[in-house]
Structures are given as structure tokens and as C-alpha cells.
Image (cartoon, rainbow, N blue to C red):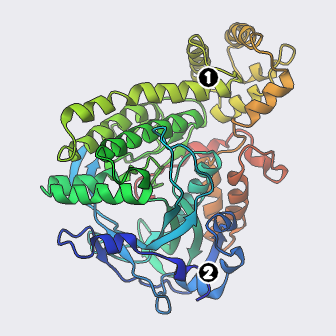
Amino acid sequence: MTLFIDRLEHTYFESFKEREDAHFSPVMASRLLDPVVVSSNKLLAEELGIDPDNLDSPEMLELMSGNFMTANIKPIALVYSGHQFGVWAGQLGDGRAMTLGELPVAKSALGEDELGETEVPHSELWDIQLKGAGPTPYSRFADGRAVLRSSIREYLCSEAMHGLGIATTRALSLVDSKTQVYREEVESGATVCRVARSHIRFGSFEHFHYRNQPESVRALADYVVQRHFPQWTEDSDRFIKLFKNTVFKTAKMIAQWQSVGFNHGVMNTDNMSILGDTLDFGPFGFLDNYNPDFICNHSDTNGRYAFKNQPSVGLWNLNALATSLTSLLSSDELIDVLKQYEPEFLNQFRGIMASKLGLEQYQAEDELLSNELLDLMQTNNVDYTILFRSLCDFTATNHTVRDQFIDREGFDQWAVKYLARLEQQRLSDAQRRDNMRAINPKYVLRNYMAQGAIEKAQTGDYSEVNLLLKVLQSPREEHPEAQHYAGLPPDWAETISVSCSS
């Protein structure tokens, strides 16, 4: 098979295959019936060193639909546990996903890592994982399948997040089929080829901690260090460096979520990446009108994962991870690192929001300026994405953005302060506009957009999926072919309900 199978490595399998504590289970895929390619991510293929022309080949379709008969691969499902909605859920694991192996990819840029240390040259290994290819030992009596509806959402949103510059898993291909899957109704089965730097989660460490297997916690931590931070391998403080990296990267990721109005919807510890990448796209949602109380997950009846709660939930989850590392690090060491989460989150968020306002450097008074604008947006039901994109064109003589506010007097009062702050800079209006357009997206994956693509795809028309893929991979460009997605969402968008099963 002239694809990428011969390049796959099996470091996770080889590292833990002799251990009796079962970090994973070997699995076999169950092929989809009459598979058809919905979409192939040629941009990602190029980044991974895969020939984009091979993505639509019959051989690739067979592989991506779960037919491994001619491929020399060793698929495995990973075990993990976790806290779900704040409650210990015990053993979970890859119930509908299997890792085919790890693909070596030349690292495009080397420099300093998150802790300011010089990285050593090495090839990164990216997990190649197939989601929806049948049951695993961790399926918990379920069928291990994914439906087209949820697969489209994950495929598009993972690329949308990457297009926004946020650390995330990616998606290489999306396959539809005639396999019938039973959820609330009969739906067509689908697979997503998910690509990630790692699928190891906070819950991976929790699993062995709560099974009282400290040696397995250590083995997993050493594996993460060896694979992702080889410059730390011989360091006696490698575990504290690993935890600090997770804390800082998680703080940055959630600050970026908040800055683009992204609500994850199910921030369980089993959905949190040890590398601080956005992981598991289920009942996510992007803000339409700015509403910090927004809850995108219909299953979240208590609003634990509401938009405004994401920063504090991030810290709660990091506390849970810290507990699982107490066999490696002292409580004092863990607490000292955890105390750095909030300052790092605020530093990241304040810097991003200043940039969204066209400010070259954050100053202390800018937080009040930003918060006053957000308060006005909330009370006036102003669309989050459209407002910041429109603000790019704001000048002393162009106040058309004020038309988005019912309370125009309130906006005018804020605009006086904003103009005074802009006058402290030497940027021209055109320079500031360009800077702001480079950070404020014109497009995000709103639920109604995903729903429209889903409804067309369910009739066999995959054109909208591919249009959205193109737009969301470069969401700050104008995209004349997608202007209908740049305006306010239709009224019916409010009726869309997304749950954990979506």
C-alpha cells in the first residue's frame, strides 16, 4: 500500500506491551459498508508528508473505512479513567477509537519550549487514529461506531480550531457509509481519521493513580517526556517540568478559547490533553450573541461547563491531574505550579484581548476597557465574532459599528475612551486595521453552519462540508464564496440542541 502505513511507528505499543497493567488493548476494526469519501484534508496531508493525491485513492478509502486486511498495522485502544461533570467515573477508555500507529513528521520549527529551554532537533510523532471503526474492550456495551452527524462536527471543528491558531487535534479524512447505526434514530455510520500529537489525557494518569499503580504512573510520565520533550529525559526534575508545561499550555489554550468565544461543552478530565491541545469535539459551540452564561451542551443541566466557567474548570481539572501525580511529586511542588495557572491564564487572555482591540501592548487600564465593551455587548445582545471583526474598521470618523448596539449612547461613551487609548499609539488606522484582521476571524464554525452541512451530507451532497473546510482553515480571509456565513445567524439557529451524544 503506497500510502503512509510503512512510515508508521508503534512506540506506545512497544513501550507498554510487556506490562501487566494494560495501558492499552489490541483491537480489530469492523469495516463500514459501501464507504464513500466525504472530505479529505489535503492541507494536513502535506504537513504530514503524505501525498495529497493518495487521500482519495481506493486503498486509502479501504483503510479509512476500517479494512486493515492488506495493511501491516497494529491498532490499539487506550485505557483511561476520569472525572465526568466533577464526579469520578472510573475506567473509561477508547470506546470508539483505535490508534493505528504514530507517524514521524519533521518538526517545522525549533526554538525554545514552553519553559524557555532550548529544544533538541527531533521528528515529532503524530498519532493516527480512526474513530468510529467498531467496538473495543472499552466500548461499555456500545457499538463503537460514530455517526455522520457527529463526525462532520468533529472533522470541521478540529480544523476550525487549527485555523484560529489554537492547539488542537486535527482530522485527515471523513468517510460516510451505508452502515446503519442506531442512536435516537437510524443514522449512517462514519469514520474520522483523527491526527494528534498525543491522545494521552489527564485521565490516563488518573487511571493508574486510582488503581494504586504508582510505577505505571511513572512509566507513563517517562513515556510522555521521552516522546515529546527529549531534552528533559535525563533531568531529575523532568516530572515537575512536564506538569508545569501542562499547566501553562492548558492556561494558554483556554485563554484562546475564551478569546474566540469557543465553548467546549464537556471538559471532563478524560477530555483534557496532557499536552494542552483541544481534544474531543462533542457538544461544542461558538458564541453568537455574547453571553458568558452560554451552555452549549444540552446534557449539562447544571451549567458546569458554561462558557464563563471554562477557566476555573481548567484549574479544577489540573488539580485532579496533580492528585494523580502525587507519587512522583510532593504536594508543595504541585501546589507551587498550580498557583501559576491563574496568572498565566490572565497574562495570555489580557494580551489576546488587547490585540483584538488593536493595541500593540497591554496596559493595566486596558482590562477595564475590554470588560466595559464585553458588558455592553452582553446587555445589547451583540454578536461576538461580527463585533470584533467590524471593530477593525473603527476610526475617529467611522463609527458604523455602533449600529450593532441598541444603547448607542453607551457605546459612544466607550468609544471616547477607546479612541483616546488608540491615540497613544503610532499606528495608522490602516496598520491597526490590518493587525486586527490578522487576529479577529471573520468566520467561526457556528452550530447552524455545521447543521446545514450535515443536512446536505445526509442526502449525499458533501459540497457544504468541503466549502466550510476551506473557509475555516483560513477564517480571517474574506472568502467571497462564503459571504452568506459572515452575517448574523438565522433565527432558527437558536433551536439547535447539541448533547453529549452529538
Task: Work out whether residue 399 or residue 125 is closer to the camera in this orientation and state it.
Answer: 125
Q: Secondary structure at mark 2?
A: strand
Q: Quadrant of residue 312?
A: top left
> Dot 1, crowdedness within 10 Å: few (<14), some or many (≥20)?
many
Labels in figure, total:
2
In this rendering, is residue 371 above or below 460? above
In this rendering, is residue 208 above or below 13? above
Q: Is residue 172 left or right of residue 341?
A: right
Q: Is residue 290 left or right of residue 403?
A: left
Rendering coords of residue 462 (x, y %): 68, 69
In this rendering, is residue 220 above or below 71? above
Quarter of the N terminus within the rendering:
bottom right
Q: Secondary structure at mark 1?
A: helix
Look at 26% across and 69% down and name the residue there: 140
Rendering coords of residue 349 (x, y %): 53, 28
Look at 65% across and 70% down and name the residue there: 39
In this rendering, is residue 63 above or below 502? below
Residue type beneath disc 2: Val
Look at 77% across and 28% down and name the residue there: 392
Q: Find disc 1 in the rendering and name its residue.
A: 377
> Dot 2, crowdedness within 10 Å: few (<14), some or many (≥20)?
many
Residue type beneath disc 1: Met
Rendering coords of residue 437 (x, y %): 76, 35
Rendering coords of residue 160 (x, y %): 62, 51
Q: Quadrant of residue 280?
A: bottom left
Note whether residue 178 is visible. no
Task: Work out whether residue 374 or residue 214 is closer to the camera in this orientation and state it.
Answer: 214
Q: Find disc 2 in the rendering and name its residue.
A: 36
